[in-house]
Amino acid sequence: MCGIVGLFLKDKSLEPQLGAMLSDMLVIMTDRGPDSAGIAIYGSPSKGRAKITVQSADPKQDFAGLDALLKPVDSSVSVELKSTHAVIETNADKASAVRDLLSQERPGIRVMGSGDSVEIYKEVGLPKDVVSRFGIRAMGGTHGIGHTRMATESAVTTLGAHPFSTGADQCLVHNGSLSNHNNLRRELVREGMTFETQNDSEVAAAYLTAEMAKGKDLGQALTSALDDLDGFFTFVVGTKSGFGVVRDPIACKPAVMAETDQYIAFGSEYRALVNLPGIEDARVWEPEPATVYFWDHEKAA
Amino acid sequence: MDLSVKRESLDTMRVFDLAKMPLRDLNSALHAIAPGANDTNFEVVNPRGSHAVAVGIDQPVTVEVRGSVGYYCAGMNDGGAVTVHGSAGPGVAENMMSGTVVIEGDASQYAGATGRGGLLVIKGNAASRCGISMKGIDIVVQGNIGHMSAFMGQSGHLVVLGNAGDALGDSLYEAKLFVRGEVKSLGADCIEKELRPEHIEKLAELLEKAGITDVKPQEFKRYGSARTLYNFNIDNADAY
């Protein structure tokens, strides 16, 4: 199974509540998958700054003195510790130097995601525990996606949890299972992509990143995915300003969407949407098989 | 058939608020009805997408569900009249035996799957696999249906006022399919067939039962099995 949720806000006055709304949606989906949970939140980017969300299995040791370690590379760096994760904010032009130093000096640290605006939190455990451990409810943002996992294709670990991020400000959650992920992974490795896990969903994320690197927008990359990915999938995908949904042509994996003047919402089930404001009068529909849906804050503006 | 709620039955309606009580209270009460009982009118409020609402009914009760439901609503219904004043998730009225289930909104995938009898009316659209493996149920969809509908349908009738998606009636047995709009594609061994007087008569009966008055039976096309997959054909041995 697996439960996935997504929320793309149109009404700026809801932005401070994004974390709380998305947390509620995800917690309701707990019985679709109790193995691990994760959320990606897109906050407002600040000009010239970059965010790197990192994780460690041994945060006490890996995060000790992180601030002091990184200051010589970028004196403006700030580190916010959140349980097993930390969000490092740097000047955008220093971000890769900061990452290089991290991998050299703190090899136990894994990068969960990076970019101008995304923060990604994921851990083994129930959604309610994961969202409270990282204080997700207090977070604001423009859009976000979440996942609660019932593992089938790879181990139950933090790195095997969703969302998967394989490019700046990109992330993906997946309900389903891919059957050609090993082949596709080999092809993507040849093209220069790197992988952290044996997970099929990470391959889907990397595939979209590779397609977008060739100049496609999110909608075009999702359209190519319909030709190149084999298996069952309902994907919800986030980019810096965009939000996309696609289902495979068989469309066994459930999906419900709702749209009002205030938001576009996605849930594996209608239950995930029932607490959203104005849901009674929302346009509610089931996304069509093999059909790409995507929205973009920048294109809408 | 008049599907609206009668005033006198409203007076004795038993109301179950799923925001305040567990689903099992509702389903246990439905299962506890003895044959011949007269307190058979139920109302369900705040279903909020709950799964398995009003499953396993085996007495002629009426259930009015005020809102949208999740998986398997009215599954295995045997004689009840269930109306969902909202939309239904996957598997609504799955394996219905008899009775009536009406969905005022849309239905998700495999509505009426494996149903053996009774009438399922969907006033909006139905998603993929509507009526999959149907075995005697009658299904009337006022909107469109998705792909692979009536797959391996054995008997019963599927009536669609709108359009049908890809692979309608794939590997069909003797279920009869009637579509008023476009069929995107027919599945293996499903063909268009002549609409004969007995089919027009059956369609008129089903439309009337579903409360549809502004559509004529003659507006439909009939689809059924070409019956070429019924028996193993030695010429196809290479395909296995």
Image (cartoon, coloured by chain):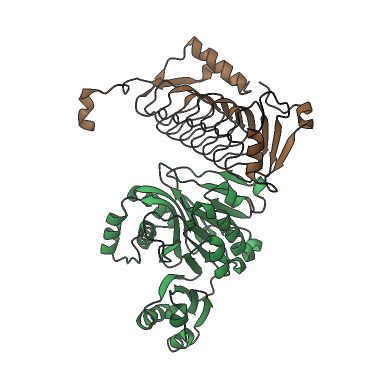
Residue B14, percent from left and from top: 73, 36
Residue A288, percent from left and from top: 48, 42
Position of residue B57 relative to residue A149, above or below, is above
Does residue A138 appear to the left or right of B178 in the view shown? right
Identify the image quadrant of residue A150.
bottom left
Taking the image as drawn, is residue B45 in sight? yes
Residue A67, percent from left and from top: 48, 85
Does residue B34 appear to the left or right of A161 in the view shown? right
Position of residue A259 relative to residue B75, above or below, is below
Quadrant holding the N terminus of chain B: top right
Give the camera-side residue of A224 and B20. B20
Position of residue B25 relative to residue A18, above or below, is above
Residue B153, percent from left and from top: 43, 26
Chain A display color: green
Give the camera-side residue of A215 and A147. A147
Chain B display color: brown
What residue sits 70% from the left and 29% below the top?
B40
Q: Residue furthest top?
A: B197
Position of residue A138 relative to residue B140, above or below, is below
What residue sits 58% from the left and 20% below the top?
B207
Does residue A240 appear to the left or right of A196 in the view shown? right
Give the camera-side residue of A193 and B18. B18
Quadrant holding the C terminus of chain B: top left
